[in-house]
Image (cartoon, rainbow, N blue to C red):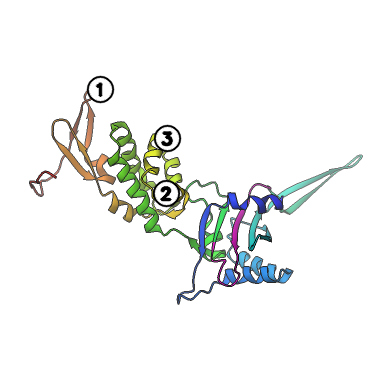
Amino acid sequence: MLEAVYGKSNVECKIDIAFNHAPDGSQKNDCRSLIVDYIKAPSVEAGKALATRLEGFTTGSAGHGLLFLMSGKEGKETKFVISRFPADNGILAEENRSTLSVSFLERIFMKSAYSYKAALYQDASLTSGFWDGRCVDKQNNDPIKRISDYWINDFLASSLRVTSAAGTYRLAAALRNATRSTKQLALKEELVAAVTLAKGVKGRNTSVDDFIQRFGLSNAARDAILRELPSPDVASETFQFNWTEFTTQVAYRSVELDSGAIVTAEAAEFNEVVKRQKLDKDKVRLSVEGKVLNERLKKAS
C-alpha cells in the first residue's frame, strides 16, 4: 500500500506548493528543516519531531491519524513523501462456541487505504533544494478548496505556488479573451454566464480546470478558454480566487442588439439591473430603470 502511495505521488500530487520564507525574508522554514533533518538521518526521533508538529496543528475535526514518512533515491535526486491516514472508531465482535465477545476500539488507523493526505518533495540538493513541492488531499471532498488549510498552511508552513492575483488574472483574461474571439452567440452567452456566477468561488482555492468543471462548461467553452492560456499546463495550477482582481479584469458586460443599441452594466450585476424579456425565437427586449447620471458621445473605434 505504501509503495503505491510513494509510486503514485508524482501523478496524484497535483497542487503546487512552496515553503514560506521567514518573516524577515530569509530562507528559513521550520517544517522544511525537520524534513531535511529526517532525510539526512532517518530515525524515530526525527520522525517524531514531524509528527509532533502535525499534532500541534491538527484540528479537532481531523481526529487521530497515522503518519508515514517515505524517502528514496530517484536517479541523482532524493524523493520524500509524507502522508497522513485518518483514524476511526469501531466495534470488534469475536464469536466463540457459545458466546459473542464485543469490544470497542477507539483507534482504527486504517480507516481507508484510499483516503489520505500526501505531500511530495524531490530535488538533487538538500541544501538549496526542497523548497517547492506538490500535495494532494484525498480526504477532502470539496472540489474547489481541494486541500485542508491546516495541512498546507499550518503544518507544511507553505503557500500555493501561484499567487492569488496572478492566478485570478490569468483565469479572468482567458474568459474575457475567449468571449471576444468566438463568433458563436451561444458560446459567448455560456462564457458570460460563468463570469456572472464566479462570485460563488470568492476566496476559495481553484484552478482553470476546476472553474470549468464547477460550472459545467461545455467542451467548446473549455477549448475556447484553454486556447487563451499561455500553455495548457497552467490550467491545473491551483490559486486562491481573488474576487476584486477578477472584477477588475471583467468589470463590464455589454449586449449589442441588431437595432444598433448597446446595453452595458457591471458584469457581476448585469442580470440584476438589466431585465431581459424573450419576444420570440430570435428577439429579446432589454429594459433598465434608474436616474440619469450622465450622457456622452463616443467616436467609432
Local secondary structure at mark 2 = loop
Tell me which label, 2 or 1, sits earlier in the chain.
2
Q: Amino acid at mark 3?
A: Asn
Which numbered circle lies on residue 62? none
| Quadrant placement of the C terminus | top left
Residue beneath disc 3:
219
Q: Position of residue 266 (x, y in %)?
A: 24, 47
CA gap, disc 2 and disc 1? 39 Å
Relative placement, left or right, of 117 versus 165 is right
Q: Are marks 3 and 1 in contact (CB under 8 Å)?
A: no
Residue beneath disc 1:
281
* Residue for point 42% across, 47% down: 208
Q: Nearer the viewer, residue 178 or 186?
A: 178
Residue beneath disc 2:
231
| In this view, the mark in front (3 or 2) | 2
Question: Overall secondary structure of the magenta stretch?
Answer: loop
Q: Amino acid at mark 1?
A: Lys
Relative placement, left or right, of 167 versus 31 is left
Number of numbered discs = 3
Tell me which label, 3 or 2, sits earlier in the chain.
3
User: Toward which corner of the image does residue 215 lie, by quadrant?
Assistant: top left
* As drawn, 120 above or below 286: below
CA gap, disc 3 and disc 1? 25 Å
Q: Position of residue 133 (x, y in %)?
A: 55, 60
